[in-house]
């Protein structure tokens, strides 16, 4: 079974996993090298915080409410 985890490989050969990993002994691994700045400069990563300030408001919820399923009343009908 393949299990993918994210890690940082340092120039001295040290490998730091970014999440807990439990091994039962030596493991064969495949390594894919990426640029460190790829994730930091991605549009999604950069825009998430700034968009959250606009999206996390009650008036935004109200503006999109018509796209949400109708709420059920106590007798099963819509409110």
Image (spheres, rainbow, N blue to C red):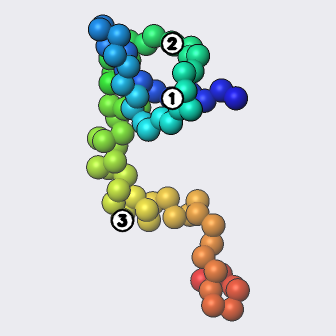
Decide: is 67 above or below 20.
Answer: below
Foreground: disc 3 or disc 1: 1
Q: Which residue is mark 2?
A: 32
At a point 35% along the width and 10% down the height, the residue shown is 13
The disc label shown at residue 5, or none = 1
Residue, far top: 11
Residue 79: percent from left, percent from top: 60, 83
Q: Which residue is mark 3?
A: 58
Q: Quadrant of the N terminus?
A: top right
Question: Is tag 2's residue or tag 1's residue first in the polypeptide sequence?
Answer: 1
Q: Is residue 21 visible?
A: yes
Question: Is tag 2's residue or tag 3's residue first in the polypeptide sequence?
Answer: 2
Residue 66: percent from left, percent from top: 56, 63
Decide: is 32 above or below 5.
Answer: above
Label 3 SS: helix
Decide: is 9 above or below 43.
Answer: above
Decide: is 55 above or below 2.
Answer: below
Question: Is tag 3's residue or tag 1's residue first in the polypeptide sequence?
Answer: 1
Residue 55: percent from left, percent from top: 37, 52
The disc label shown at residue 23, or none = none
Q: Nearer the viewer, residue 7 or 75?
A: 7
Residue, far bottom: 75
How dense is the environment of label 1, judged by Cα within 10 Å: few (below 14), some, or many (20 and up)? few
Foreground: disc 2 or disc 3: 2
Q: Disc 2 vs disc 1: Cβ atoms closer than 8 Å? A: no
Q: Nearer the viewer, residue 3 or 42?
A: 3
At a point 30% along the width and 41% down the height, the residue shown is 49
Distance from the alpha carbon under mark 3 to that under mark 1: 37 Å
At a point 56% along the width and 32% down the height, the residue shown is 24
């Amino acid at each position: 079974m393949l299990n993918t985890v994210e890690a940082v490989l340092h120039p001295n050969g040290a490998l730091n996993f970014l999440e807990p990993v439990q091994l039962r002994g030596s493991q064969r691994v495949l390594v894919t090298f990426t640029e460190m700045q790829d994730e930091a400069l991605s549009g999604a990563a950069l825009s998430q915080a700034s968009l959250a300030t606009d999206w996390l408001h009650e008036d935004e919820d109200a503006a999109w409410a018509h796209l949400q399923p109708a709420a059920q009343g106590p007798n099963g009908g819509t409110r």
